[in-house]
Amino acid sequence: MKPLITILLVGMLTSSCYFAHAQDAVDAAVEQEAGDPNDADNIEASKVRIAAQVEAMLEHFQQEDPTGLPGVPIPDPMEVPDVKKSLGMGTLVMKEVKAHGLSKFRIDKLNLDLKELRINGGLQLDEMLCKGNYELASFFSKTKGPFTVLLRNVYAEATAFLAVERDGHLNTDRVKIDITFANMAMDFQNLGFLGSVFQSVVNSAPNLVFDAMKPFMLQEAEKKMRLEIANMIQTSLGDRKLPNSITPLDSAIAMGRKIVRQKGYDPYHLPDMNRTMGVFSVQLAHTWINGVSSFYRVGNITAGMANKTVSVLLQLGTQQITGAGQWEVGLGMMTRVGQVQFTVQQIRATIGLSQSMDTRKRAQVTDLQFDMGNIQVRCDGAGTLDYIMEFLVNVIPNLLRYQIMDAIENPIKQRVQEKFNAIDVEQVIKLMAEKYEKEGSDFTFDPKLLGI
């Protein structure tokens, strides 16, 4: 049972670790491993394998009912440690037990809470068959023989909590695992004289045999899970330390703010705008916006998968946004030129996105809500009209800003959805895998890959 739980968490854990210190950690790991020529060859081979696994995964989730995961080694059958259980009327020992059918699992759900560093997931099996040999001994007799236990509708659920330790390293704090099933059928052969007694015990406690095996399964699963999580953290972060004064999520957002400034998006230059209506014309030029990189987390950021669909919900806000530009208004042969300065107290957005695991389908905007703080505008160059324009802009939008936000949410949502509809998700993923093969540790995401 341990591979079930391991696979359950590894994927989402990788995302959380990578989100915390993505490219820097990968670069450091690759540079460290590339010191030896043989290691360099292994890295190149690994990149090719990753690209092949990505393509296999894409094809896998295009099936109507995908079971298992391609490229993930699942021992089937898997050996279970010997089990000894006291039944009151005797002692039951189960030996050489092997569990069959583990590779036919379905991923039911995966949920990642980036704020709480909590990963939760569930796997489902239609059937799990356990075969082995048993010995049943009492004061009166002793019998042994083969046995089978068939579990139907098996469900394995695991929750892992991560935490930043005092030394700054991310590690597994605690793990909760449980395995349940809908019904069970058992067949113990050669029971002889003890058969009726054993059957009465089983009928009174139908989970008895499974409960005897369950602690061993959970113990092995937790041990394997902690090991896999530690390996993933080591691969993603190396020896890098995270601040324990703030959450890794907020640390990652702070890194995002730095990247926005480095990319030249703050201050941000808006394209010039020209509008002409008959003899009347308006031009807005040389407009710059400051404060774009002041975004921060308002609520939680969660990601999950259910019903073959990945969904993300995030709530972000900005601090004060300021801007300035030059305007020109023309009426026939007369023109006026002036300056405009504006301030928005804050902008908050709730964004929900979803993407089917069948990447032939397009991403969807499931939720989009905006909240804007007070707006202040100062105009210069229109003479007396400056006061009228400032009054109209400063008073009316602030009185009606909630209605304005409600009115523009749907058009913006439709516009964003149109952009998403133009993105071939499957092709973008394949191109990114090819780009990674070529660039390796120098890999950076290029927005041009989106094709919009």
Image (spheres, helix red, strand yellow):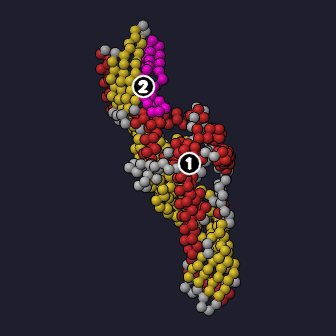
Whole-percent x, y for residue 26 in the image = 55, 44
316 in the magenta segment: no
1 or 2: tag closer to the N-terminus: 2
Indicate the secondary structure of the residue bearing disc 1: strand
Say whether residue 286 is visible.
Answer: yes
Say whether residue 17 is visible.
Answer: no
Nearer mark to the viewer, of 1 and 2:
2
Category of crowding for the residue at label 2, using alpha-carbon neighbours closer than 10 angstroms: few (below 14), some (14–19), many (at least 20): some
Residue visible at 54% across and 71% down?
215
Give the answer, above or below, for where 273 lies relative to 91.
above
Separation (CA) of disc 1 from disc 2: 36 Å
Residue visible at 65% across and 73% down?
97
277 in the magenta segment: yes
Whole-percent x, y for residue 158 in the image = 53, 61
Disc assigned to residue 110: none
Residue pointed to by mark 2: 288
- Horizontal placement of 254 versus 426: left or right? left
Disc assigned to residue 310: 1
Q: Which quadrant, please, contains the N terminus?
A: bottom right
The magenta stretch is 261-289
Q: What's the residue type where badge 2 is placed? A: Trp
Query: In the rendered image, which quarter is residue 27 located in?
Result: top right
* Number of marks present in the image shown: 2
Front residue of 54 and 377 = 54
Indicate the secondary structure of the residue bearing disc 2: strand
Give the answer, above or below, for where 168 lies relative to 225.
above
Majority secondary structure of magenta residues: strand
Q: What's the residue type where badge 1 is placed? A: Val
